[in-house]
Amino acid sequence: MLGLLILAAADACTLLTAKEIETVQRERPQVSKPTSQPAGELNVRQCFYQLPTFEKSVSLEVTTGAGAKAYWRKAFHEERREEEEEEEKERPERVKGVGEEAFWTGSARLGGLYVLKKGSILRLSIGGAESKDAKLAKLRALARSALKRL
């Protein structure tokens, strides 16, 4: 069983190459750290690509399983409750041109790109002090590369 978890965790790190990350972030990853965790009907596999400038590191997460599409609908399509709207939380922003459907969530500093493809959910985020638009352009490029291997 442990071997299966290690293999599943390693799979997330195979979705991006060091060259693809270097092309976008201008630094080659020093370390790729895979993790995996089952969460009910979901299996979440992650990879953290640590770059020499730590703030430029890349985080990738793949969510699969029977509950993935329901999770996507709840996160991006169901109406928010009034309490959430009162808190003025940012609504996900639709992103075109990647996957079956994609959304940006969060701020320029802590945001991420969520992409749906073939019943799997890909989440990517990168560090750094760039604008949201600059990060989103980089995340689209990384997502397109990762989706080829998903």
Image (cartoon, grey):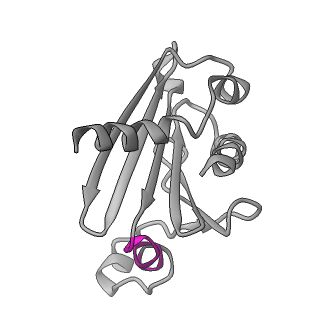
Front-most of 21 and 136?
21
- Number of numbered discs on residues: 0
Q: Is residue 59 visible?
A: no
Give the residue at x 50% y 81%.
Answer: 77
By secondary structure, the bulk of the magenta-drawn segment is best described as: helix
- 70 within the magenta span: yes
Give the residue at x 47% y 75%.
Answer: 69
- 109 within the magenta span: no
Q: Position of residue 108 (x, y in %)?
A: 55, 45
Front-most of 143 and 64?
64
Q: Position of residue 91 (x, y in %)?
A: 50, 70
Please state if 19 lies on the left or on the right of 114 as rendered: right
* Residue most extreme to the right: 97
Q: Quadrant of residue 131?
A: top right
In the displayed structure, would residue 42 be above or below residue 49?
A: below
Q: Position of residue 64 (x, y in %)?
A: 43, 62
In the displayed structure, would residue 103 be above or below residue 6?
A: below
In the displayed structure, would residue 94 be above or below residue 47?
A: below
Q: Quadrant of the N terminus?
A: top left
Q: Position of residue 107 (x, y in %)?
A: 51, 50
Give the residue at x 64% y 47%.
Answer: 149
Please state if 94 lies on the left or on the right of 64 as rendered: right
Residue range (magenta): 66-74
Q: Is residue 46 visible?
A: yes
Give the residue at x 38% y 34%.
Answer: 34
